[in-house]
Image (tube, helix red, strand yellow):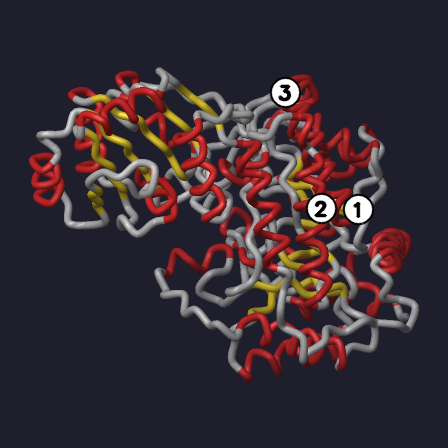
Amino acid sequence: MTLKQKIGQFFFPAVFINDTEENIQATERLIKEHNIGGLTFFHSRASAATNYETKKKIVLNDDSFQRLKELIIRYQNCATTPLLMSIDAEWGLAMRVEKTPQYPYAITLGALPNNQKNLVYEVGKQIGLDLKSVGIHYNLAPLADINNNPNNPVIGYRSFGQNKEKVSDFALEYLRGMNDVGILGCLKHFPGHGNTNVDSHLGLPVLKETLKELLANELVPFLKGIEHNVDSIMIGHLAVPALNDGKDTSATLSKSVIETLLRKQLGYNGLVISDALNMHSVSKLYDQKGLLEWEAFNAGNDVLCFAENVPEGIQEILKNASPERIEASFQRIWKCKQKAGITDGNLRLPNLSKSDFDFETTSKLNLKIAQNCITKIKDNHNTVTVFDAKNREDLAKISIYKNTDNVFFKSLTHALPSPEFSYQTGGESVLNELEKNLGKFDTLVISLFVPKAKPLNNFDIEESVLQFLGNVLATKKCVLYVFGNPYALQIIPNLEHALGIIEMYQDFSEFQETAAEQLLENVDCKGTLPVMVSIQ
């Protein structure tokens, strides 16, 4: 390859599974004309990185999986150098593609006891097999961020928790699972995005920690990853003034973070990839096209993820970079391509006629995870209390944000018949009516299906719902099952009055079945909260 062709290998522009033919052809021209190194897949333009703020509606497409396979074949067929296909699939292809297997969030896995970390390995392995079947080689996951800020708008449920040792061990298990089936992985977001309160898609978070503090906490999972020769490390769009002579320079554009700290001090010589360069924390810094790509490369990134100015970026790097630096980055990318098995002339393309996954294996794995992560926050003999109320006929069940036809209630119906109520929408007037209807019941089993995993707008739990929960918790015997982000517990008023609280983390059917079994049979809860939660 010429120097210019080698530079092309550093560029991984974004491509969209549900895109127009015009856009697809534009990507094909990039591949043919600029010898780009790989592609990063997203569902659609409306769902990618910063684009969601435009409020464009995401149009779902049940054919996304087949379309993804067709696009991968099409793009590989027009590439002179095999493309390294990447995607961010932290909890499986389902994060980007409809009707594909979904695995639990990292926070859910973080609730598993240490002696069940093999289940994290299995998740990595199954995700790896799913990616492999579609022709993807590189998963931009998992997070190595330590989730030590409950108000973090973007990490939260995507992190294994706030215990640095557990985050380190579980991230490595996930990586090992993927590696064992031939899929490359990535630890992110260096030097640690956990203790931030700004979404780096939209603005620049600033970490106040010193290097000593970072080495004692945030950097621990990355250090473990470096010890185990992790395939790649993603640099986060976050500023650490202590590492930059007091300046708020994004780590992705900082030589002192990448070259000095990561390469020289921590001894990492693997692939370094930038976080998406369309994110507003960096994308608005330079008016001239190509300058951002050059600055990111110059800072020490080998791969420029979601680069939006490929021809201009190549020219800037060609003009400014030394041949030695270009060769060093090229060799790192080539080593990853060799490990992925795509440089030997035997590129394995997906099978278009085969479109089914092993959903049964996924379901069995999710059930095992549910049984081992279920977490008892508070227990005052739930089962005895509930069955005693059933015998007196003063028991009712309430489902919040799902109708009564949910798996949890259906699993309880035979052994625990009682009137069932639900609230999905309608606000204060509907909730007032519900509260009246509950007047004659003394004991309530409440299932709260938390609407959103992110903390924005109180996880989308309405203020009227919080007030309703506060009222019934203060006046009745309540046993609460929470299907969703455990941080939601912090915003529920009068939670200390609940007789029992069980945290389930997800609303998958396997998790609902496990919750019902726990209530009916008083099964031991093996999970522990992966984050500190203060109950009001």
The alpha-carbon separation of the residues under discs 1 and 2 comes to: 6 Å
**Which residue occupies the foreground of this view, 182 or 213?**
182
Which mark sits nearer the N-terminus, 3 or 2? Answer: 2
Where, by quadrant of the figure, is residue 358 drawn? bottom right
Q: Label 3 is placed on what type of residue?
A: Thr
Task: Tell me the CA gap for discs 3 and 1.
Answer: 27 Å
Label 2 is placed on what type of residue? Cys
Which is in the foreground here, disc 3 or disc 1? 1
| In the rendered image, the vertical position of residue 436 relative to residue 442, given as above or below | below
Mark 2 = which residue?
186
**Element at label 3:** loop
Q: Residue at x 54, y 51 (%)?
A: 285
Percent across and percent down for residue 259 are: 78, 38
Position above or below: 483 against 363: above
Kind of residue sitting beneath label 1: Asp
Residue that carries the numbered disc 3 in the rendered image: 210
Is the residue under label 2 in contact with that under label 1 (CB below 8 Å)? yes
Instruction: Identify which residue is drawn at 40% across, 39% down.
Output: 483
First of labels 3, 1 by sequence position: 3
Quarter occupied by residue 496:
top left
Secondary structure found at label 2: loop
User: Is 291 left, or right, of 532 in this rendering?
Assistant: right
Quadrant for the N terminus, please: bottom right
Residue pictured at 48% horizontal, 21% vertical: 532
Front one among 146 and 63: 63
Q: Which of pointers 3 and 2 indicates the residue nearer the eye?
A: 2
**Can you identify the residue that label 1 sits on?**
231
- Residue 520, image x, y percentages: 40, 31
